[in-house]
Image: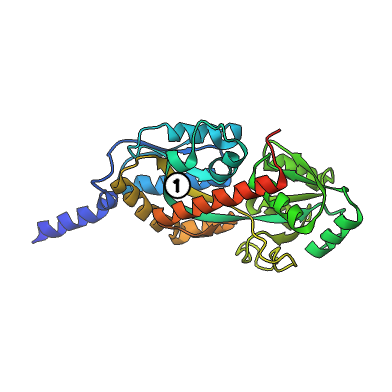
């Protein structure tokens, strides 16, 4: 019987094979990130890719293909073979926002991409330059109304989640603010810190250190519930604008026609991965709220997001120019 115990022990050591799934092709796969390395989407892709490699016993590498607000990498995945070897770790911009601004995109996210799982929501944080004499959302609204046209806001670019959050805020409050788009969130935040721009709806991971260092002042978060990363900071809704909600999200998709068996395998493993204690803690540090979903509920979520963003773009008359 000793040889049986030895075989059992060896089987336990070969843990990755225990997760291997016959539905998944045993070849190297890549997770495309349509943004530069270092951001929340990239970090999440690397965490998930490392764990998928361990579980499925084959490489899942991250492939950064940035450009055109994420449209380049997204289009690449949309035109890839639906074999499970090319996936997209996506943010909101190229999936639900840019399509509302640009009907001439070479891909249609509703038609050309297969949702696998929504992974996390990412609230924006309303921050102001310290020289602006406001400490609450209501004080900001009062200041803006008494200084019409005197407020400017920075974003990571036209159509970014920061841009739409600011436009929804302007629509709900009636404030007239000047949009100052940047090529990414970091340079925009730098100018808010320097007082060149007054306001920014920035992602929590980008703004958190500046808030803690006193370089910007945080007024609120843009989700309906408070962020676990900053539980003492009120929501915009709590601060006086009922039902205000504007947030980014991160999720995994593949090309249209991804086989149901591959979708089910990825969905199961990714949901288990992001709920692992060490990974969920890392995502919390990034200001992300883990909300893994099924493929069907992710599809419903995307359809609703696309419709909402089109409504905001139309109401605010946002264009790419």
User: What x and y, as percent, mark residue 77?
Assistant: 44, 35
Q: Residue at x 60, y 35 (%)?
A: 102
Q: From what the image shows, is residue 132 above or below residue 29? A: below
Q: Which residue is mark 1?
A: 252
Q: Is residue 33 left or right of residue 197?
A: left
Q: From what the image shows, is residue 19 above or below residue 231? A: above
Local packing at callout 1 (Cα closer than 10 Å; few below 14, some 14-19, many 20+) is many
Residue in front for this viewpoint, 209 or 110: 110
Q: How is the image coloured?
A: rainbow
Q: Residue at x 74, y 67 (%)?
A: 239
Q: Quadrant of the C terminus?
A: top right
Q: Can I make out residue 319 in this image?
A: yes
Q: Is residue 315 left or right of residue 262?
A: right
Q: Residue at x 65, y 67 (%)?
A: 231
Q: Can I make out residue 136 in this image?
A: no
Tally of numbered discs: 1
User: Helix or strand or loop: what does disc 1 sit on?
Assistant: strand
Q: Quadrant of the N terminus?
A: bottom left
Kindly indicate the quadrant of the structure image that contains residue 126: bottom right
User: What x and y, as percent, mark residue 254?
Assistant: 41, 41
User: What x and y, as percent, mark residue 320?
Assistant: 68, 35
Q: Residue at the far left: name it.
A: 1
Q: Residue at x 71, y 63 (%)?
A: 236
Q: Residue at the far right: name it.
A: 146
């Amino acid at each position: 019987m000793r040889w049986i115990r030895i075989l059992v022990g060896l089987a336990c050591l070969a843990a990755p094979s225990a997760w291997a799934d016959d539905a998944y092709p045993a070849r190297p796969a890549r997770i495309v990130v349509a943004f530069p390395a270092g951001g929340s989407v990239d970090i999440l892709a690397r965490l998930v890719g490392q764990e998928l490699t361990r579980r499925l016993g084959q490489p899942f590498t991250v492939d950064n293909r940035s450009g055109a607000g994420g449209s380049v990498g997204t289009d690449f995945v949309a035109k890839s073979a639906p074999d499970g070897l090319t996936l997209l770790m996506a943010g909101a911009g190229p999936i639900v926002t840019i399509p509302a601004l640009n009907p001439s995109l070479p891909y249609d996210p509703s038609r050309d991409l297969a949702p696998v799982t929504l992974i996390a929501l990412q609230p924006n944080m309303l921050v102001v330059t310290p020289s602006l004499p406001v400490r609450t959302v209501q004080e900001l609204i009062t200041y803006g109304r008494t200084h019409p046209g005197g407020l400017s806001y920075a974003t990571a670019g036209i159509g970014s989640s920061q841009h739409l959050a600011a436009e929804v805020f302007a629509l709900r409050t009636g404030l007239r603010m000047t949009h100052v788009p940047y090529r990414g969130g970091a340079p925009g935040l730098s100018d808010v810190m320097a007082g060149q721009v007054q306001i920014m709806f920035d992602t929590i991971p980008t703004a958190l250190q500046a808030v803690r260092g006193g370089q910007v002042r945080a007024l609120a978060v843009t989700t309906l519930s408070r962020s676990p990363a900053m539980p003492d900071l009120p929501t915009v809704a709590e601060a006086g604008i009922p039902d205000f909600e504007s947030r980014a999200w991160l999720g995994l998709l593949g090309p249209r026609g991804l086989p149901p068996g591959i979708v089910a395998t990825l969905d199961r493993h990714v949901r288990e991965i992001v709920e692992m204690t060490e990974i969920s803690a890392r995502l919390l540090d990034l200001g992300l709220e883990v909300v893994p979903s099924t493929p069907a509920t992710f599809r419903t979520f995307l359809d609703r997001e696309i419709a909402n963003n089109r409504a905001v773009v139309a109401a605010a008359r946002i264009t790419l120019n």
